[in-house]
Image (tube, rainbow, N blue to C red):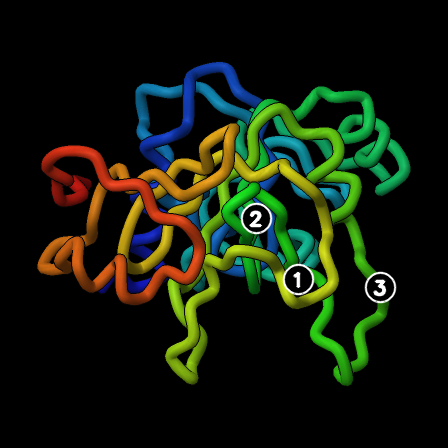
């Protein structure tokens, strides 16, 4: 199974030159560390940062520079700082090409639940609703199963839904999966050492397997 950094490293291979990309809280923020050097992309955080670099080394930490997850970050050459109202204007205006989010559940129709667990206090949905409603492409980074071993790739989400039919691809610690327009998770790649049968056993939603499934490469 992949660790969180390896999930982020695999997702970085989905990045295309010239994209504006929003990185959600959690595993997605790690993607900044794995953007290929030959690509020019602009990473955005909804708290008002455009042009995020990799996480800083200890000697480069600036407590005034944080992302939406309150992690210290670096600024790339030409980056900009602005208020969150302008940041959400960029998001709602459709100027973000790719959004990478964490999730608690994803359904086989591409629904995502990533903001609330019933019975637990949260301050609000945050920027997730705007992101899933506005992004051209959404990739989810998540664990395939819960700590209790229950699948998080479901027929239908059981938790409060953030967005409907919006997820295009999911990268987990076990697999890379495409969400098909007609519904279902198409298995594209498997983590090194993970069998197709294990992925089948741990996926509640419809799983589509066609031909030989290659192992992920990094």
User: Circles 1 and 3: CB distance less than 8 Å?
Assistant: no
Q: What element carries label 1?
A: loop
Q: Mark 3 points at which residue?
A: 124
Estimate how packed mark 1 is, as few (under 14), some (14 to 19) or many (20 or more) residues with alpha carbons within 10 Å: few
Residue 108 percent coordinates (x, y): 50, 47
Q: Mark 1 points at which residue?
A: 70
Q: Which residue lies furthest to the right in this view?
A: 85
- Apparent side of residue 172 relative to residue 123 in the rendered image (left or right): left
Instruction: Name, please, the residue furthest toward the top.
Output: 18
Q: Where's residue 81, x and y in %?
A: 75, 36
Which residue is rendered at x = 13% and y = 44% of the image?
Answer: 215
Taking 217 as reference, is 102 above or below it?
below
> Of the residues under marks 1 and 3, which one precedes in the sequence?
1
Mark 2 residue element: strand
Give the residue at mark 2: 101
Mark sitting earlier along the chain (1/2): 1
Q: In which quarter of the image is the N terminus?
A: bottom left
Q: Residue at x 68, y 54 (%)?
A: 68
Asked whether, in this view, residue 215 is left or right of residue 119, the answer is left
Front residue of 52/117: it is 117
Residue depicted at 66% across the width and 25% down the height: 96
């Amino acid at each position: 199974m992949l660790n969180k950094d390896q999930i982020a490293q695999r997702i970085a291979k989905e990045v295309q030159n010239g994209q504006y990309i929003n990185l959600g809280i959690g595993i997605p923020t790690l993607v900044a560390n794995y953007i290929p050097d030959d690509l020019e992309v602009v990473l955005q955080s909804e708290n008002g940062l455009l042009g995020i670099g990799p996480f800083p080394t200890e000697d480069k930490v600036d407590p005034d520079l944080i992302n939406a997850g309150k992690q210290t970050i670096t600024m790339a050459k030409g980056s900009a700082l602005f208020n969150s109202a302008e940041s959400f204007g960029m998001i709602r205006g459709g100027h973000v090409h790719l959004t990478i989010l964490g999730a608690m559940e994803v359904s086989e129709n591409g629904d995502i639940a990533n903001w609330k667990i019933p019975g637990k206090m949260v301050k609000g949905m945050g920027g997730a609703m705007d992101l899933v409603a506005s992004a051209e492409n959404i990739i989810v980074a998540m664990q395939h199963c819960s700590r209790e071993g229950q699948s998080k790739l479901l027929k239908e989400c059981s938790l409060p839904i953030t967005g409907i039919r919006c997820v295009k691809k999911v990268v987990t610690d076990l697999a890379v999966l495409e969400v098909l327009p007609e519904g279902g998770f198409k298995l594209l790649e498997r983590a090194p050492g993970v069998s197709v049968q294990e992925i089948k056993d741990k996926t509640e939603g419809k799983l589509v397997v066609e031909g030989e499934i290659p192992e992920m490469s990094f």
